[in-house]
Amino acid sequence: MSIKLTDEQIEKSKNITNMDFKRITKIVGNVVFGIMVLMVALLVFFLIQTKVSGGPPAIAGYRMYIVLSGSMAPAFDTGSLAFVKPMKPEQIKEGDIITFRGFGEHQSLTSHRVVEVDDSTSNDIKFITKGDANEVNDPSPVPGTNLVGKVAIAIPYMGYVMSFVQTKQGQLILVIIPAALLIISEIRKLYINIMKMNKEKRSEEKLENEV
């Protein structure tokens, strides 16, 4: 049994489809706009914080460091952004991934997994560490005094973005241009709303004059 739609029904169906498409497009546009605003705000925040403090940016008590090697793959790889929570040595357990300073003149930071906690000396906790991608443990135990904190999470590729945004080209492409586009977009919306209000006002005045 076939059902034949009238021209009016077909036209109504088309209008509903167009309305749904416009509604979906508007929702997607708002989501993308919101994400852009959030990204620009975060990048500007990180940039300003880094400039002011002279150290790594931090948010909600977590310090952010760019991963420069692949020794912890597959847990996280080069170019990831690691969020490190400052902790006391006695709070670290076996299996935790920690960030620690190098020894002597080498103050570079390393993030490796704790494979053993040596607390035989109560005043000097040490950690035996190893990169997940390495076959052997690190050559020297890590003193508790060298501990920076525990890695809570690492976001892939975000470190590349953070590194790039600190350059002049990065600031232009990832901060200034998007910020300018957002401002232009808001000005355009404001202009459209003003024009719409003026049109409605003229229509009301016309109706009053006709009465």
Image: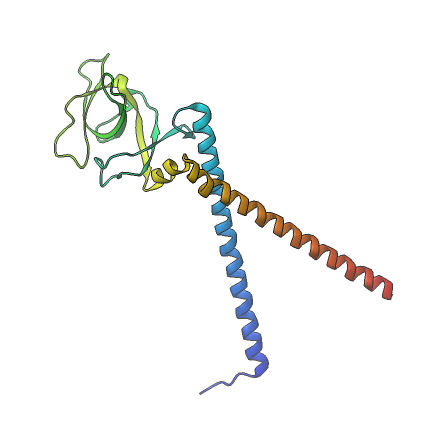
Q: Nearer the viewer, residue 195 or 150?
A: 195
Residue 73, position in %: x, y? 22, 39
The C terminus, quarter of image: bottom right
Colouring style: rainbow
In the figure, is residue 150 to the left or right of 20? left
Residue 66: quadrant of the picture: top left
Residue 7, position in %: x, y? 57, 82
In the figure, is residue 67 to the left or right of 16? left
Residue 89: quadrant of the picture: top left
Residue 6, position in %: x, y? 56, 84
Instruction: Please name the residue shown 22% across and 17% down the image.
Output: 125
**Among all residues in the image, which is located at the extreme front?**
169
State whether residue 42 is above or below residue 26: above
**Among all residues in the image, which is located at the extreme top?**
123
State whether residue 12 is above or below residue 136: below
The N terminus, quarter of image: bottom left
Residue 165, position in %: x, y? 41, 37
Instruction: Please name the residue shown 51% across and 49% down the image.
Output: 33
In the figure, is residue 179 to the left or right of 190? left
